[in-house]
Amino acid sequence: MGSLHVELPQLMSEITRRDFINGTLVVAGGSMLPLHAAVGAAMATLDSSYYPPALTGLRGNHPGSNEHAHSRAWTGRADWGPTTRLPEAYDLVVVGGGLSGLAAAYFFQQKHGKDKKVLVLDNHDDFGGHAKRNEHTINGNTRITYGGSQTLVEPNRASKVVLDLLGDIGVDLDRFKTAYDTGFFEKHDLGSVTYFNKKVFGEDKVVQHPYCNYPNYVEGLQGAKLSNEEAARQAPLSQRGREQLLRVLNGGLHTLKVSGDDLAAYINTHSYFDYLKDTLGVDDPGVLRMARHSGLDWASTGTDLMSIGEAKSCGALGFEPVAVYDEESPYVHHFPDGNAGIARALVKKLIPSVAEGDSAEELVLARFDYGELDKPSHAARVRLNSTVVNVEHAGDPGDSSEVLVSYIQDNKSYRVSAKGVVMACYNMIIPHIVPSLPREQAAALKLQGKSPMQYTTVGLRNWRAMKELGIGLAMSPGNMHQAVLMDFPVTMGGYEYTKSPDDPCVIQMISCPYGDTVGAPRLDQFRQARYRMLALPFENYEREVRSHLSGMLPGEMFDFDRDVASISVNRWAHGYTTGGPGDSTRIGRQPFGRVVIANADSAPGADAKTAVMMGHRAINELG
């Protein structure tokens, strides 16, 4: 890495603006490092210039993060060349550095002593899993946002285990009530709109109506400014399509020929799309597309796979808005970097020297020293860029006291030993990594699923164009990213959200990719969307963002090359947990000798509280 600093003056002279947009370079503490160098670096050589949160370009499942795991799972690869047996023995090895894995490490030391040796291995270049921190530096101003897990959902209803953990790492739940500015959107007259793009709908047009309930996830965001009638009239559809759209918007379950107890049973067993087509007479492709994307990530699938009841519950096209959370549990528990704030506080607890700050809030602006993560002098260590490919007991699983863990780092194979192992990774990969699992348990784990998700964060030099059109959130049924929104207005720990349209900001672009065939089985759609997501180079994502924003925002106020400073595409091939059929989740998470299973998958669930609880359960099972 030292040679890169020597070459910096020459490198600087060759930088173009496109390098910043493409994320091929990263500004980090005054140094610039190529992405491939940062990703492949061995932890022992890391210094203060290694700082993944500031990387842009392809993030989340970034290039290099999944290749070895896929090789293991897809081709059964077992030969990784010579394996170096490191002179490292741990009390616990945790496979996966997401919230569940970090919580498991925390609970283990709380239970057995802070001197116990723990190693957390993760295949990504940063810790936190889906709790990903993104930093965008715009004209010297750093904007902080999240690239995945965004919110502590209903934390006041968490178990004592979770609340005690949050208290111990310095999370003040009451602080969020004042940190989140619920008046921000009203002050700037930012509401919920829909952007129709030219490619799918024939023209670029913004209509001041969301046509669904999704904007209710943003506290304080204003709703539709148009009546259903005017919103249908303005939609860029054929006359027949506008008539059908209005019929859906004004429709309701009273149109069904069932009532009472029969109605409840009917809506939970009959398809929402069949209801649209057969009951409301919808066949316009534009209306059906709007409907399919109106639930977004609420149920991890398009509404084509929802029952009428599910579509009603999430406020899909044609149903009245529903309250997402009640007054006692407002959707305001966001750190500026989402649940990365929790992950960072856990790492700080495990490795105190990693940053300055005594609470989660004090860590908001802290620059973590990644060189502290994997020092031999620390009882707890976090080793990044390390893909675990094999976990096996040193003897019979029933009475073995040692587990051998093999991982790949920088294309080299290493092995360490531990008295116990927590598998806090994607549950579906576990049978490939722990090949000696009982057949029934391995089969059950392979049934667990996750839906692909994508959070693209875009650094803007100003948001005057968003202000001009009154866009707080724009549903975008014709685009890859079905929703575009202003980042949450959170001020905390010395960090202030953007206040003026003239100031830099970050916008979120959310994609819940579905398969090409409407109504196809869920797992088939996930698989197709996942492969497509991972196959796209960054240039394709940049082109999509360029087309989306340039088509949506007024040209006299927005110029992509002038106003976009940076893009981070956080791809999560295995995003929201969807679970498996029947009793497969319980069977799959059973302890196996000195190996136990965590991750939110093993609940199954898809939130931070669940991830923490699964880490706690796994440690208790380990004994």
Image (tube, rainbow, N blue to C red):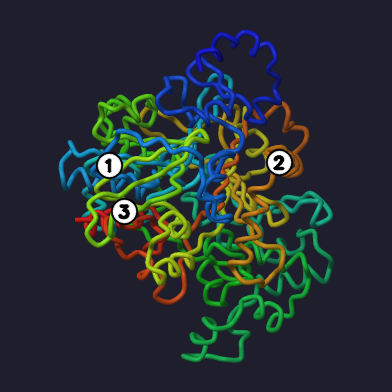
| Mark identifier at residue 271 | none
The location of residue 65, given as percent across then percent down, is 53, 41
Query: Is residue 570 placed above or below 453 in the rendered structure?
Result: above
Distance Cα–Cα, label 2 vs label 1: 37 Å
In this view, 3 is above or below 572? above
Residue 195: x %, y % from top left: 71, 51
Residue type at numbered disc 1? Asp
The residue that disc 2 covers is 549
Tell me the residue that label 1 is attached to.
172
| Residue type at numbered disc 3 | His
Could you say whether the residue bearing mark 2 is in a helix, strand or loop?
Answer: helix
Task: Find out whether the residues at labels 3 and 2 contact each other: C-beta distance under 8 Å.
Answer: no
Look at 72% across and 50% down and name the residue there.
Answer: 206
Instruction: Identify the residue position indicated by label 3 in the image.
Output: 393
Measuring 29% from the left and 49% from the top, which residue is drawn there?
104
Q: Nearer the viewer, mark 3 or mark 1?
A: 3
Residue 367 makes an appearance in the image: no
